[in-house]
Image: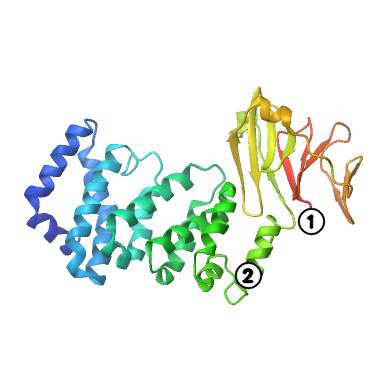
């Protein structure tokens, strides 16, 4: 059963809500009204209850905005029990109520922002949506404006594995009060200028081990054949299975984008003098790393911050911090 607050609003505006549902059925002929009803119960009711407690005078407007948006999301197959990705349902049910004061003043903007973010982060292979949700909920009480919600959401999406957000997230963090920016990075009490300078200078700050990326497509991975890699300023251009990709990676994650054969042919960064391969031993300055692939035909590529190691014996790319 839905809450008394939500039930009362639906009953008092029954004709208006029914008209909106009828119009949505014309726009979305495949709209499943049972799925829509389920989403009202599971996704809309919790945020109506939260707004009713925080700003009861605003709950009617919030309910109407959420109802209209729900019709569209369920109509597009993005929300409800048959959603393409259930994370959006979770964000409405569990995260959106944390922002009741903001919802009360700007329901369309807040729900649109959270919904778009949920759809995007859930679509990025290797990203960690649950981490993004958990960390954003923990900071909800400190977020006072839509601009802060947008900026913190972007920072936390980067930290949850959306590696190509790095530059935008750092720019967004600059717009936040220093205490909130530091909280978003999990470093309360530190001097923000120092933290920012370190993040700008070293994409692998906080991760000295690097990461491994990729596996065989037959096992659900990205690469049909062992990849070949060339370094670029933005990451690494990868060739595998007659396809080309741009791999962007840092301390928080790795993301694969489409690239072209021309981009693969054009990039060829020089190898830093501090990097040397001796059999299966990779030496980076004073560091010595034993590679777990057979000697011979191991290839290495490096940009300003990262070394990529590939071998014809594996579909994975090993990414190591250069510093």
The residue at 83%/44% (across/down) is: 291
- Residue shown at 41% from the left, 61% from the top: 147
Q: Residue at x 20, y 40 (%)?
A: 33
* Left or right: 33 in relation to 222: left
Quadrant of the snapshot with the N terminus: bottom left
Residue under label 1 = 323
Q: Distance between the residues labelled 1 and 2?
A: 21 Å
Asked if 215 appears above or below 119 in the picture, the reply is: above
Which residue is drawn at the image coordinates 57% and 58% (left, top)? 170
Q: x and y percent of residue 242 in the render?
A: 66, 22
What is the x, y in percent for residue 144? 38, 69
Q: In which quarter of the image is residue 12?
A: bottom left
Q: Which numbered disc, 1 or 2, marks the residue that appears first in the sequence?
A: 2
**Does residue 106 appear in this view?**
yes
User: Circle 2 — which element?
Assistant: helix
* Protein image colouring: rainbow
**Of residues 223 and 219, the one drawn nearer to the viewer in this rendering:** 223
Q: Position of residue 177 (x, y in %)?
A: 50, 71
Nearest-to-viewer mark from 1 and 2: 2
């Amino acid at each position: 059963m839905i809450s008394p607050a939500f039930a009362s609003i639906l009953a008092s505006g029954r004709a208006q809500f029914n008209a909106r549902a009828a119009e949505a059925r014309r726009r979305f002929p495949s709209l499943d009204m049972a799925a829509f009803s389920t989403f009202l119960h599971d996704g809309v009711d919790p945020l109506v209850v939260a707004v009713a407690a925080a700003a009861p005078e605003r709950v009617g407007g919030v309910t109407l905005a959420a109802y209209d948006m729900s019709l569209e999301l369920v109509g597009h197959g993005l929300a409800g029990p048959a959603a393409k990705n259930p994370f959006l349902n979770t964000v409405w049910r569990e995260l959106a109520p944390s922002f009741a004061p903001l919802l009360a003043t700007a329901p369309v903007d807040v729900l649109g922002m959270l919904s778009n973010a949920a759809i995007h982060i859930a679509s990025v292979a290797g990203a960690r949506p649950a981490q993004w949700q958990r960390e954003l909920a923990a900071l909800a009480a400190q977020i006072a404006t839509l601009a802060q919600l947008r900026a913190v959401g972007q920072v936390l999406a980067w930290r949850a594995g959306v590696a190509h957000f790095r530059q935008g997230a750092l720019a967004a963090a600059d717009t936040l009060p220093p205490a909130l920016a530091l909280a978003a990075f999990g470093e309360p009490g530190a001097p923000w200028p120092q933290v920012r300078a370190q993040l700008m200078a070293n994409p692998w700050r906080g991760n000295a081990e690097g990461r491994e990326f990729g596996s065989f497509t037959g096992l659900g991975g990205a690469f049909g054949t062992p990849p070949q890699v060339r370094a670029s300023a933005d990451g690494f251009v990868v060739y595998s299975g007659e396809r080309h990709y741009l791999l962007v990676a840092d301390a928080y994650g790795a993301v694969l984008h489409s690239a072209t054969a021309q981009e693969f042919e054009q990039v060829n960064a020089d190898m830093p003098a501090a990097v040397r391969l001796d059999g299966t031993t990779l030496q980076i300055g004073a560091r010595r790393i034993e590679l777990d692939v057979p000697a011979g035909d191991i290839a290495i590529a490096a940009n300003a911050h990262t070394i990529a190691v590939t071998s014809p014996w594996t579909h994975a790319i090993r990414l190591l911090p250069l510093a």
